[in-house]
Amino acid sequence: MTPATLRFWVPVAVIALLGLGLRLAVIQAVPTCADFQTSADGCLSVSTDSGEYLLGAEYLAAGNGYVLLHNVESESAHHPPAFVTYLGLWYRAGVESPEGLRRTTAVLSLLTVALMASVARSVGGRHAGWVAAGFGALYPALWVNDVVLMSESLYQVLAALVLVAGYQMWRRRSLLSAVGLGVAVGLAALTRSEGALLGPLIAFPLAIGMVEISRWRRLAMVVMVGAVSAALVAPWVLLNLSRFERPVTMTTTTGQSLFLTNQPDTYYGERLGSKSGYPLLLGSSARAKIDDADESDVDTRLRAEATEFQRENVGRLPVVVAARVGRVWGLYETQSMVRDDHLVEGRLKTPSRLVWWAHYLGLPLAAGGVVVLWRRGLPISPLMALVATATFTAAVNFGLTRYRAGADVTVCIAASVALVSLARAALGRLGPTRGARPTPG
């Protein structure tokens, strides 16, 4: 390691450790809720997805496969496998308490910060790398995900890894670099299903911009990204296809999401663009279980009910989609989003508010950073792919703050580029931008 490299990474390591300290302090201050407690009692609720991950880790560590919170006797594809596998490995190693497992997700922030610093350094220079590390350590939308036992903590790491791999492919323009991007995309897809979209959204624009190499080589790189990511996802898909009555690829929750977001209240009422109908969901699922249906049957029934509602209200769909996207980006019903994060997602109210205050400060800076990179001739498709994926996920489901997890990595990196550019323009003494080259090197 050269002295210059060491001078960059030592501050990044210090910042990452400070970020980890913040997360551990939050975990210490906010215990996991006991039975009959909710987030309104000042604790972290694990009654929804986080509870499923907890139980899933326990049963996976015991060798019982992937199970559902309320159906521990049969295997489940309620979530992609990567996050529960991560927790299961820690559970197998003896970390069994909710607080202990929350600390293992906080540790992931060390990787997130380091990878974000690497990306920002490659496109904006070392000062941007240090600022991005600071964002990664302190940005509320990131550290909140790291302390609540949700898959977004791992997805943030992989979103940053996808960016590292994407810019490596742009610079090296080799099949090996395409393999790296395919691995990162495959792991992201195994954490959150929409991660699969990152492959084409990044690989195609990058390949189009590589005009100095042959079309066949560019095509080979794109194919390699898709083939590697598909190879990583294939074992999970094949397992699902073999164990359910109806075809299942990534998860059995598509129907549930569509059911909750296609309700009268989410089209015409105060829940416009959000989700509603949990009592109806439980009733429909109960009916399916009475009929001895497995998860794939439940998913199919819920999807059919949601599709019928969509057909009957198709004229309202543009307004609903706009509201969903508006919610996830803070353009519509922000106070309602804070309440949902607190009461539905189980997070504390003050951190939920901090997420949005920081978002409104960071988003304009991020937009400026993207413009700076574009004017320098650097590809912005890797960064914008995370934004597009978050937007698409909200558009087809509902407005949910944590759907923005990957995009928040982009916001932090782009904002760091903007801040350094502003500082350089104002002070004129930060030196040349290093690492921000539009050509391989």
Image (cartoon, helix red, strand yellow):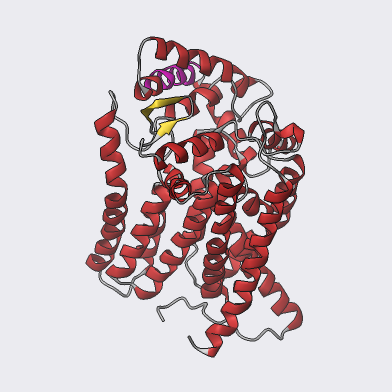
Left or right: where 226 falls relative to 123: left
Question: What secondary structure is the magenta-colored segment mainly?
Answer: helix
Pinpoint residue 165: horizontal percent, then vertical percent: 41, 65
Residue appearing at x 54%, y 57% in the figure: 108
Left or right: where 113 falls relative to 389: right
Q: In the rendered view, would you say 278 is above or below 391? A: above
Task: Tell me if residue 307 is in the magenta stretch.
Answer: yes
Residue appearing at x 50%, y 40% in the figure: 393
- The quadrant where residue 7 appears: bottom right
Q: Nearer the viewer, residue 64 or 402?
A: 64
Pinpoint residue 267: horizontal percent, then vertical percent: 59, 22
Q: Is residue 41 visible?
A: yes
Q: Is residue 365 visible?
A: no
Q: Nearer the viewer, residue 304 or 79?
A: 79
Pinpoint residue 328: horizontal percent, then vertical percent: 61, 41
Write the start and end of the magenta stretch as one range: 300-312
Q: Nearer the viewer, residue 76 or 168?
A: 76
